[in-house]
Amino acid sequence: MNSKPIVAGNWKMHKTVQDGVSFVGEIKNRVLDKAKAKVIFCPPFTALFSIVETLKGTDFGVGAQNVHFEAQGAFTGEISIEMLKSTGLDYVILGHSERRHVFGESDTFINRKIHAVLNSGLVPIFCIGETLDDRKAGRTIVVLEGQITLGLDGLDSIDHNRMIIAYEPVWAIGTGETASVEQVVEAHASVKDILSGMFEENANEVPILYGGSVNENNAAELIETKGVDGFLIGGASLKEDSFCSIIEIVSKFYKG
Ligand code: PEP
């Protein structure tokens, strides 16, 4: 993919088509230093096609927030990979904590999506992270290991150009509480170790994003943290000023 830091915005269930198109149009004109960070917008399904069209000819990326692994059929309310691909996007968020905890997606269910997305040529943004109870019980690394080994089960290899991992402690998502630098360093190093144990090549180079209440005030410290290759951002990705500030900070402070 690239060695640039990645700034991905997960809009969750926010913004209409019109709001989304005007938002990315503004950001497209504002983010001048496009060479230094890979920016990916992940709007709701309804806005995907129009946003891809708005961003045509730019380096901005577009991703979906979910997908079903079946190619087609009687799956009311679901969306297939071909449908997503027909919008022209490149990325799909999988295993987000809200999918796991609100909609009950299991590791094995997410694993089927990972396989389907990789087979299609799209790039998964594979989310993992422990709950507060897990952390309090000292189970963070065990939980990450389980999510990674089950989520990536059955893959023969991993391509750092075609996989993004997002470490998102569940207790930090949308709470205003971020993981400490020490917690992020430990989690990201563990993710790298787990990947290296599973896959011989390239595992070390898979980009690992941090997610969980990233904003313009904590972005500099977090992007300078060892092992952090960028961010997956919820709340702050919905606000033009905040999102642009974070992109600028990441472009300036990322050391790689
Ligand atoms: C997210 O939804 O992936 C996320 C990290 O949200 P927030 O930045 O709002 O914590």
Image (cartoon, rainbow, N blue to C red):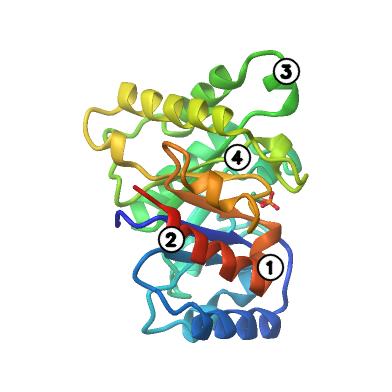
Q: In the image, 227: left or right of 183?
A: left
Vertical order, 153 against 248 (above or below): above
Give the Cα separation between the discs numbered 1 and 4: 18 Å
Q: Nearer the viewer, mark 3 or mark 2?
A: 2
Residue at left offset 61%, top offset 55% = 233
* Amino acid, disc 4: Glu
Element under disc 1: helix
User: Which residue is the site of mark 4?
Assistant: 168
Q: Quadrant of the N terminus?
A: bottom left
Indicate the position of residue 150 as horizontal and vertical percent values: 48, 27
Give the Cα separation between the discs numbered 2 and 4: 23 Å
Residue at left offset 45%, top offset 24% = 190
Q: Are marks 3 and 2 in contact (CB under 8 Å)?
A: no
Few, some or many residues within 10 Å of mark 1 (<14, 14–19, 20+): many
Vertical order, 169 against 222 (above or below): above
Q: Earlier in the sequence, mark 3 or mark 1?
A: 3
* Amino acid, disc 1: Leu
Indicate the position of residue 165 as horizontal and vertical percent values: 46, 43
User: Which residue is the site of mark 1?
Assistant: 238
Q: Are marks 2 and 4 in contact (CB under 8 Å)?
A: no
* Amino acid, disc 3: Lys
User: Which residue is the site of mark 3?
Assistant: 136
Q: Earlier in the sequence, mark 1 or mark 4?
A: 4
Residue at left offset 45%, top offset 74% = 86
Give the Cα separation between the discs numbered 3 and 2: 35 Å
